[in-house]
Amino acid sequence: MRPKKSETTGEGDLFRARLDQIINPKHELVQLAGWIDWAWIDQEIVPLHSGNGRPGVETRFMIGLLLLKSIYRLSDEAVCERWVENPYFQFFTGEEFFQHEFPHERSGLSHWRKRLGDKLELLLAESLRVAHEAGALRSQDLKRVTVDTTVQPKAITFPTDAKLLHAAIKGLNRLASRHGVRLRQSYSRVAKAAAMMAGRYAHAKQFKRHQRQLRTLRSRLGRIIRDIRRKIEGQPALEEAFALPLGRAAQIRSQQQRQRGWKLYSFHAPEVECIGKGKASAPYEFGVKASVVTANRRAPGGQFVLHARALPDTLTTVTPCARSSTIPRHSPDVRSSEPMSTRDTAATTRKIPAASSSPARSAGYSASSSAS
């Protein structure tokens, strides 16, 4: 459910200290909290909340924590620990009185990141608007921009055949349990033992025994796929829920180690590609190509990132993994990979009234790109 808006009463409390009475109003975080348009951010995030359930955590609290985490380069645990002992952190996240305990669970940051998804670009747009109004970013600094690409490594394990088959078996079992589909056998214990022994045999260079364990995993995965398809036949809702996972599992079951053509390298992240880097220590990286747009000249406030976007399926340097037509690449859970022009640097930003001279959050950047 949509979280409640944080409201300050302005009243005092006999047993608690007000933050505005113990902090310096000229502190950088206090001034930044006044510049940010928290109401606009809350309005843009409203569609991401469901109409059911209990109210969520306040938008300013979670967005403030994400900003503090990025500003000070802290982990989730570290930013929560510093929040308890730092009154400026508490004021920045909308607290009125000093708190001696963290009011929410640390895992809420992870849940909010997953919920935001592409909406994280709102924070980038708001930071550019604040930088422009504060004088840290000028309009003349945006006349020329630099567009560059890099590799964004994904948090996946090294994709061996045994690991992928085991991950597909676990993923299908987890999905079947979630939707109430009762399988004849889960093969969880057998698959775990086979994956473990496959790794040991490969390390000992006993490849015949290694292949035997892989055949065991493939046969068990095939049984689960056929069992699920029989159980969900004629049920459109379940068929739609299992369409993508079953397609990924079938692809993992059919692909071989040294085959040519497109391969799936992760069951839970199908957008991952194998990218050749040419390094002696790490010849390949598993991730997604990403595009970053920066100002071509240094602004008074430093170097600013104007736009960042993941570009799956647009690789220029890859391993011998040419595209295969067995499974469509553009699944609904993979973001679009259309080419990005320099005018897209503000395509996701908020429009400013005509009276304002701020170029941020507007789609009217007249920038000429110089590809780096």
Image: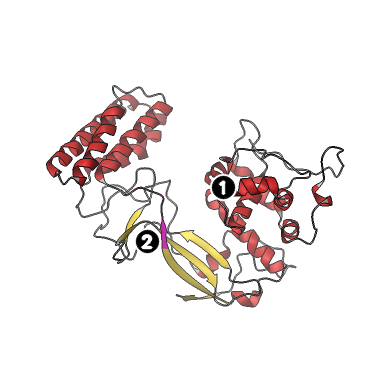
The residue under the point 20% across, 39% down is: 214
Q: 330 or 158, which lies in front? A: 158
Residue 130's spot in the image, x, y percent? 69, 63
List the residue tagged with mark 2.
314
In this picture, residue 15 sits left or right of residue 334: right
Instruction: Check disc 1: other Cα within 10 Å, few if <14, some if 14-19, many if 20+.
Output: some
Q: Position of residue 216 (x, y in %)?
A: 20, 34
How would you rate the neighbour count of disc 2 (Cα within 10 Å): few for under 14, some for 14-19, many for 20 or more?
Answer: some
Q: Which residues are magenta?
A: 151-157
Answer whether residue 85 is visible to the viewer in this image.
Answer: yes
Q: Nearer the viewer, mark 2 or mark 1?
A: 1
Tell me if residue 348 comes above or below residue 98 in the rendering: below
Along the viewing direction, whichever of 22 and 252 lies nearer the viewer: 22
Query: Real-space Cα distance between discs 2 and 1?
Result: 32 Å
Label drawn at residue 76 = 1
Earlier sequence position, callout 2 versus callout 1: 1
Q: Residue at x 29, y 26 (%)?
A: 230
- Mark 1 lies on a secondary structure that is helix
The amino acid type, in three-letter code, at marker 1 is Asp
